[in-house]
Amino acid sequence: MGIVVNLDVMMAKRKIGVKELSEQIDITMANLSILKNNKARAVRFSTLDAICRALNCQPGDILEYVEDEADEMEKEG
């Protein structure tokens, strides 16, 4: 699976919606939704910085590495 974006989880914890966060960090709602829904292929450090500042969190609260099942089987087998 690779890198998973848990932005939706952190937004729920902070009780903030897409519209409010997009306004706070000056990013379009469409681009924020792409991030939130794990559709992004990349994220700029400046965007990550702004998200962390707005949500008062660390990058590790938003980004998580999840190993592929195929990778796990390779290691075992």
Image (cartoon, helix red, strand yellow):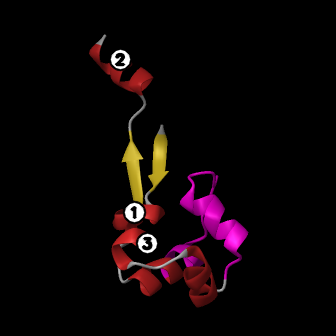
Residue 24: percent from the left, percent from the top? 57, 89
Residue 19: percent from the left, percent from the top? 61, 80
Q: Earlier in the sequence, mark 2 or mark 1?
A: 1
The residue located at (37%, 78%) in the rendering is 14
**Secondary structure under badge 1?**
helix
Observer-nearest of 49 and 21: 21
Identify the magenta region.
27-49
Observer-nearest of 55 and 47: 55
Residue 52: percent from the left, percent from the top? 43, 79
Position of 75 compared to 48: left or right? left
Q: Earlier in the sequence, mark 2 or mark 3?
A: 3
Disc 3 to disc 1: CB gap under 8 Å: yes
Q: Which residue is mark 3?
A: 11
> Is residue 32 part of the magenta span, yes or no?
yes
- Mark 3 crowdedness (10 Å alpha carbons): few <14, some 14-19, many ≥20: some
Q: Which residue is mark 1?
A: 9
Amino acid, disc 3: Met
The residue located at (57%, 84%) in the rendering is 20
In the displayed orientation, state which residue is furthest to the bottom.
24
**Quadrant hosting residue 55:** bottom left
Q: Which mark is residue 73?
A: 2
Amino acid, disc 1: Val
The residue located at (40%, 25%) in the rendering is 69
**Secondary structure under badge 3?**
helix
Asked if 6 appears above or below 77 in the picture, the reply is: below
Distance between the Cα atoms at labels 2 and 1? 29 Å
